[in-house]
Image (spheres, grey):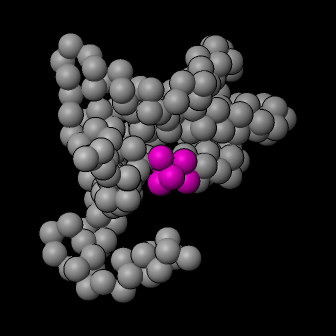
Amino acid sequence: MNTLAATWDWFTSAANWSGENDVWHRLGEHLFLTVVCLALGCAVALPVALVLGHLGKGGALAVNLSNIGRAVPTFAVLVLLLLSPIGMYGQRPTIIALVLFAVPPLLTNAYVGMRGVDADVVRAARGMGMTGSQMLFRVELPLALPLVLTGVRVAAVQLVATATVAALAGGGGLGRIITAASTRSSPRPTSLT
């Protein structure tokens, strides 16, 4: 019951809801970090997936290579960036790690969506005299859009959940509240005398 009471006290304390390090400021940092990483992930993954899905070549290799990233935890990538010779701190290593984390669902869903477009529709578009780019943007992309947007949604959910690791690299976000709470609640060593 002590933890529940402490949590209630924290949520009802005015000091946690105003000032430079308040919940609203940390929430803004968290959302900014999520939006930036999602936008960068989309800028990296979606053009590759759309082109490879349109061409029908090399997509399986790209999807498998990007899915290797799912096997490596974001925290491990963050630690490697922190311990690298260039020793990045703050938001940059977190952004790199989170963008790498967002790429697999974006790339996989966009590629699968493009390859899932009915071949008869593509042949009909080609028979009507459409160029490759016209087929991509007027036929294939609109039909693949539900799966592309599903990948964006999955990546966004993963980023919101994982962006708390930013606090471990000295970045902002809601992870700062969690790490501050864990340092306050850790047991203090007592002297033997």
In the image, what residue occupies the spot 30% across and 49% down? 190
**Residue 183 magenta-highlighted:** no
For the residue pair 189 and 50, the one nearer the viewer reads as 189
- Residue farthest toward the front in the current orientation of the protein: 193
Q: Position of residue 20 (x, y in %)?
A: 15, 69
Q: Which contiguous range is marked in magenta?
A: 157-162
Identify whether 175 is placed above or below 72. below
What secondary structure is the stretch in magenta mostly built from?
helix
Identified at 38% across, 82% down, the residue is 9
Q: Can residue 106 be seen in this view?
A: yes
Q: Is residue 50 above or below residue 139?
A: above
* Quarter that holds the N terminus: bottom right
Write the residue at 47% across / 47% down. 162
| Residue 87: quarter of image | top left
Q: Decide which of 175, 151 is in the foreground and name it.
A: 175
- Residue 40, picture quadrant: top left
Horizontal placement of 42 versus 62: left or right?
left
x, y percentage for residue 3? 49, 71
Residue 141 horizontal/vertical position (percent): 62, 43
Q: In this view, does 146 lie to the left or right of 153?
A: right
Taking the view exactly as shown, the residue that stands out farthest to the left is: 20
Q: Is residue 23 left or right of residue 65?
A: left
Position of residue 56 measured from the top left corner of the image (x, y, whole percent): 68, 20
Q: How many marks?
A: 0
Q: Can residue 130 be seen in the rendering of this structure?
A: no
Q: Residue at x 22, y 80 (%)?
A: 15
